[in-house]
Image (spheres, rainbow, N blue to C red):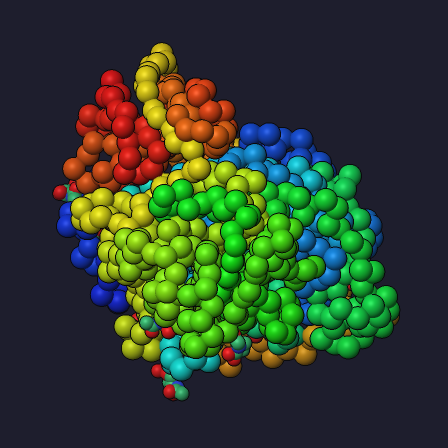
């Protein structure tokens, strides 16, 4: 047994080296601050950023509507051996199986390896799947029904390929800074809008019988320095990931908010992030995982690591991580922090068995919760090749068999995709009713690299890692292969030819002479421009995931200037991942219309043609602010390490003031504000009424939890039963739970090689299985259920005062009234379809959470005594109706 102790010490030692705070870096420890506002001036930004320890890891209780899933999961886990429990929690290694992540299996009980697959906008790395619009487009629809329908359609496609867990949707990044590379995978920098879209997407995916994964938890707000190894690859020698340093108020009021909605919606899994939070890694941060997520939000599902985001074995287990992905320490090392190491840690007692049981129960409960027992189909695709036959164990090059059955899972989803594409297109400018076009224009000219195809094909650049042709999806793991891509050039040409018009296009942005010639002949010139970004493992045109600037790519600004100088009916269509600089165009009289079309997916051309030719009346609104300069956004990214070779420190000193809240605070006028968008008709607002409901006072949750359930006692002194079975033929590089599964374990067992001491590193309280005090803000999945009590019902009348039917997104904002509160915060919205000369009622229920602030000393939400005002209107800056909330 002696060598077991050694292995244990090694895994345990990782715990302290990076666990729960590092008090030597000169940055704020506002997590500990008792400031009652996020005003940086008063928040105690004095010490180093420090993440307080919180143990033990809360065990799942079956709270909310999880009771039946828990009952079945506990019954299942009670039958498992130690090795089988470990198998369920640990991935089998990068490219060891066919999905981007797979767990070990329980062959004895016929429980197969779970298949985890990207992405938030569809199925990654396969064929005969749909390419859906990105999250940012869903946010721009402000349409709950479309968000749900897209989630359900994506879930059906994952289900049809045999996927158990779809790795999406995204609320981290939220969008603290406009250049952050992966903002488009999520929804909006507004936490309330993102929260609604998270909940709808999750419920859609899970209704289809697939587990959703809310990611990346939390304050994962930039690509630069998210992983030290990656940063070394682009020239920065750092030893640890960036730390996002955020205070308690901002954490709750901005970044945790949409995750609360995700948990309340029943999300089955959450992915912890690469970054550190207040100098403790996201996947071993006991404060964010144990305290916030499993304590305060009562999350009942499981936490998986992002791929290679795990930095310790015992540390991550005790801090609340439940599944190691993809299972190996780094890709293809054949070593794992868990697997055999987890078996050792349980046998040794360093990790209590109830913690392993809790991991397994959470995983199996999520599986039952979404009905995987009813809906699982065999895995029928392979992530690493499109060949029909190949190796099931790709990296090991073993198991030649049928690996791609090329199952077409698209159904009729193209109709929904086209609809979301047009429903998410924001009309920003429309002088003299330049739009809609009649289709009878004599000479239609289309310009731009962004109008045409990619010369390498729509999937020609792996993970969409280039900016060639029209931008319908950005780059990284958050992608899917296109089955086809309808370009704007094709769709507009079809339209014009249908009316026997003249159509010509130029897709080389730098063909100056030809562009001038064509622009001067056109009766209407439609210029397509874009701006791209993505995930940090791919560099496109010098952009390491994050954008370097907010201008257009591929010479787009020069193209707009060249065309608009010669054509006084120039229409600009933008496919961008987020904000771009438009002040040169918003007032230019030759530019008659401007449209933001985002990242619309496979039906891009048809969706924009539907808007341009008036088959669809635009009703989308901006899910972010379009400012005049990058500086106007306040918060920005860190592009150069600022802490030597140690973890770069990114302090969120702006607090809650991101996007429109920053513009409002500094009283800076944007070019187009958050929530703005025009229609081919007009709307008016009237008759605001507020009904205050009689609701009893808020009760903090009190009392204690049950003791940790005991589901079995697998630890016996006879370690022989934990050895690799003698007749077992192990696959190379594969991660197994067996004690001598690899030679490396013996090496790891020799703790003295590392000069590490022993059990003093186990965090205080982490082994405690006794009933624990319940947190005041907890009580059910999503937090204290009384936070969601409706305090006010608000109604207003919205009238279509123009000539055609149209959609209006009516918006409700609240001023919380405190000296450090944003001027207004979005709290409700509805997308209303209204016939001309008709009215409809806009209705919003205002909950207790909607009017509360986070109180750091009470560690609970509280309604302040500051006077509160409710506003209703068509954007964050056009709010014609208002009244006090008594
Ligand atoms: C900062 O954190 C340290 C613990 O690391 C604590 O002693 C100190 O009081 C904190 N300072 C403030 C202002 O919260
Ligand atoms: C924090 O609490 C301490 C002690 O209760 C008090 O002296 C201090 O003023 C508080 N700081 C803030 C910013 O509220
Ligand atoms: C663990 O999972 C692997 C891979 O799925 C499987 O080969 C092995 O038999 C499992 N071990 C146990 C003890 O169930
Ligand atoms: C990177 O930094 C580490 C720690 O400071 C140092 O040991 C190492 O030599 C550096 N590597 C390079 C390539 O500069
Ligand atoms: C156990 O974890 C250590 C890292 O802490 C690693 O070096 C070792 O290879 C692991 N053992 C196995 C069998 O994966
Ligand atoms: C196409 O993509 C490649 C790779 O990113 C790039 O080098 C090239 O400039 C692009 N060409 C065009 C015309 O966009
Ligand atoms: C901004 O970045 C894009 C993409 O790398 C590049 O094409 C463009 O020239 C840059 N803009 C400026 C002003 O440098
Ligand atoms: C804490 O941070 C300092 C400087 O950033 C670094 O030198 C030290 O190794 C870190 N300590 C721990 C325990 O992580
Ligand atoms: C029996 C055994 O191996 N015990 C070890 C378990 O791990 C702790 C902490 O690493 C050691 O101190 C024990 O010796």
Query: In the image, 336: left or right of 770?
Result: right
| Displayed quadrant of residue 869 | top left
Q: Visible in this render: residue 877? A: yes
Q: Visible in this render: residue 43? A: no
Q: Residue 843 or 760: which is nearer the viewer?
A: 843
Residue at image position (41%, 28%) is 802
Q: Quick check: 541 above or below 337?
A: below
Query: In the image, 102: left or right of 875?
Result: right
Q: Position of residue 351 (x, y in %)?
A: 55, 55
| Displayed quadrant of residue 178 | bottom left
Which quadrant is the C terminus positioned in? top left
Q: Residue 31 or 638: which is nearer the viewer?
A: 638
Q: Position of residue 763 (x, y in %)?
A: 42, 56
Query: In the image, 427: left or right of 722?
Result: left
Tally the marks.
Answer: 0
Q: Residue 510 or 828: which is nearer the viewer?
A: 510
Query: In the image, 507: left or right of 657?
Result: right
Residue at image position (34%, 65%) is 565
Q: Quick check: 613 above or below 394?
A: above
Residue at image position (35%, 26%) is 684
Please identify the residue farthest to the top as the structure is shown: 694
Which quadrant is the N terminus positioned in? bottom right
If the picture is divided into quarters, which one holds ligand 3?
bottom right
Q: Position of residue 165 (x, y in %)?
A: 65, 50
Q: Residue 191 or 255: which is nearer the viewer?
A: 191
Residue at image position (46%, 56%) is 524
Q: Position of residue 626 (x, y in %)?
A: 33, 52
């Amino acid at each position: 047994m002696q060598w077991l102790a050694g292995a244990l010490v090694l895994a345990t030692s990782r715990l302290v080296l990076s666990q729960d705070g590092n008090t030597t870096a000169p940055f704020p420890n506002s997590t500990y601050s008792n400031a009652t506002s996020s005003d940086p001036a008063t928040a105690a930004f004095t010490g180093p950023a420090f993440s307080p320890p919180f143990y033990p890891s809360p065990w799942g209780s079956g709270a909310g509507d999880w009771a039946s899933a828990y009952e079945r999961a506990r019954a299942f886990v009670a039958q498992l051996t130690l090795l089988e429990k470990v198998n369920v929690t640990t991935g089998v290694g990068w490219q060891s199986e066919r999905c981007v992540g797979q767990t070990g299996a329980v062959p004895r009980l016929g429980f197969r390896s779970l298949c985890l697959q990207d992405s938030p906008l569809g199925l990654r790395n396969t064929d005969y799947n749909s390419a859906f619009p990105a999250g940012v487009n869903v946010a721009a629809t402000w349409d709950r029904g479309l968000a749900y329908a897209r989630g359900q359609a994506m879930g059906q496609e994952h289900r049809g390929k045999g996927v158990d867990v779809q790795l999406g949707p995204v609320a981290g990044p939220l969008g603290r800074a406009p250049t952050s590379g992966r903002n488009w995978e999520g929804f909006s920098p507004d936490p309330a809008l993102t929260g609604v879209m998270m909940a709808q997407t999750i419920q859609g995916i899970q209704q289809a019988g697939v587990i959703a994964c809310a990611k990346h938890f939390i304050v994962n707000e930039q690509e630069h320095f998210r992983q030290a190894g990656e940063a070394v690859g682009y020239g920065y020698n750092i030893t640890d990931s960036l730390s996002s340093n955020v205070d308690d108020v901002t954490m709750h009021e901005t970044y945790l908010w949409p995750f609360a909605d995700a948990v309340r919606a029943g999300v089955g899994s959450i992915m912890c992030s690469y970054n550190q939070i207040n100098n403790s890694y996201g996947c071993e941060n006991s404060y964010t995982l144990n305290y916030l997520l499993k304590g305060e939000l009562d999350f009942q599902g499981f936490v998986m690591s992002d791929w290679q985001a795990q930095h310790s074995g015992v540390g991550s287990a005790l801090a609340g991580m439940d599944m190691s992905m993809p299972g190996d320490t780094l890709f293809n090392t054949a070593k794992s922090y868990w697997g055999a190491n987890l078996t050792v840690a349980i046998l040794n007692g360093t990790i209590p068995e109830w913690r392993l049981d809790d991991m397994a129960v959470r995983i199996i409960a999520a599986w039952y919760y979404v009905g995987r027992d009813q809906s699982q189909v065999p895995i029928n695709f392979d992530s690493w090749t499109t060949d029909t036959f190949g190796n099931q164990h790709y990296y090991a090059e073993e198991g030649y068999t049928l690996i791609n059955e090329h199952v077409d899972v698209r159904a009729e989803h193209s109709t929904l995709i086209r609809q979301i594409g047009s429903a998410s297109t924001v009309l920003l400018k429309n002088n003299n009713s330049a739009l809609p076009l009649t289709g009878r224009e004599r000479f239609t000219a289309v310009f731009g690299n962004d109008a045409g195809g990619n010369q390498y094909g729509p999937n020609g650049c792996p993970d969409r890692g280039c900016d060639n042709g029209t931008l319908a999806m950005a780059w990284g793991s958050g992608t899917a292969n296109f089955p086809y891509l309808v370009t704007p050039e094709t769709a507009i040409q079809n339209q014009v030819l249908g009316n026997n018009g003249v159509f010509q296009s130029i897709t080389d942005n730098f063909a100056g002479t030809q562009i001038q010639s064509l622009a001067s002949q056109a009766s209407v010139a439609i210029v397509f421009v874009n701006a791209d970004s993505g995930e940090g493992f791919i560099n496109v045109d010098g952009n390491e995931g994050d954008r370097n600037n907010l201008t257009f790519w591929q010479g787009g600004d020069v193209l707009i200037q060249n065309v608009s100088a010669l054509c006084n009916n120039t229409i600009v269509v933008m496919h961008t991942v987020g904000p771009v600089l438009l002040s040169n165009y918003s007032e230019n009289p030759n530019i008659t219309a401007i449209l933001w079309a985002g990242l619309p997916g496979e039906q891009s051309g048809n969706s924009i043609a539907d808007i341009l030719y008036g088959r669809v009346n635009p009703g989308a609104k901006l899910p972010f602010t379009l400012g005049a300069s990058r500086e106007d956004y306040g918060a920005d990214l860190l592009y150069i390490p600022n802490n030597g070779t140690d973890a770069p420190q990114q302090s969120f000193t702006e607090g809650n003031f991101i996007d429109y809240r920053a513009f409002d605070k500094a009283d800076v006028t944007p070019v187009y504000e958050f929530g703005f968008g025009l229609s081919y008709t007009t709307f008016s607002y009237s008759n605001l009424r507020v009904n205050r409901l009689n609701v009893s006072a808020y009760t903090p949750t009190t009392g204690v939890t049950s003791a940790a359930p005991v589901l079995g006692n697998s630890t016996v002194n006879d370690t022989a039963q934990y050895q690799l079975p003698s007749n077992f033929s192990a696959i190379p590089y594969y991660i197994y739970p067996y004690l001598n599964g690899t030679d490396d374990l013996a090496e790891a067992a020799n703790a003295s090689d590392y000069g590490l001491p022993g059990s003093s590193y186990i965090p205080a309280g982490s082994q405690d299985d006794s009933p624990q005090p319940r947190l005041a803000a907890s009580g059910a999945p999503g937090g204290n259920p009384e936070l969601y009590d409706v305090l006010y019902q608000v109604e207003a009348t919205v009238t279509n005062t123009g000539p055609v039917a149209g959609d209006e997104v009516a918006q409700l904002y609240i001023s919380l009234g405190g000296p450090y509160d944003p001027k207004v915060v979005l709290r409700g919205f509805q997308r209303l379809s209204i016939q001309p000369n008709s009215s409809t009622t806009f209705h919003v229920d205002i909950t207790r959470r909607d009017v509360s602030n986070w109180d750091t000393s009470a560690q609970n939400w509280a309604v302040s005594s500051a006077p509160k005002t409710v506003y209703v209107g068509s954007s964050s800056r056009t709010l014609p109706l208002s009244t006090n909330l008594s």
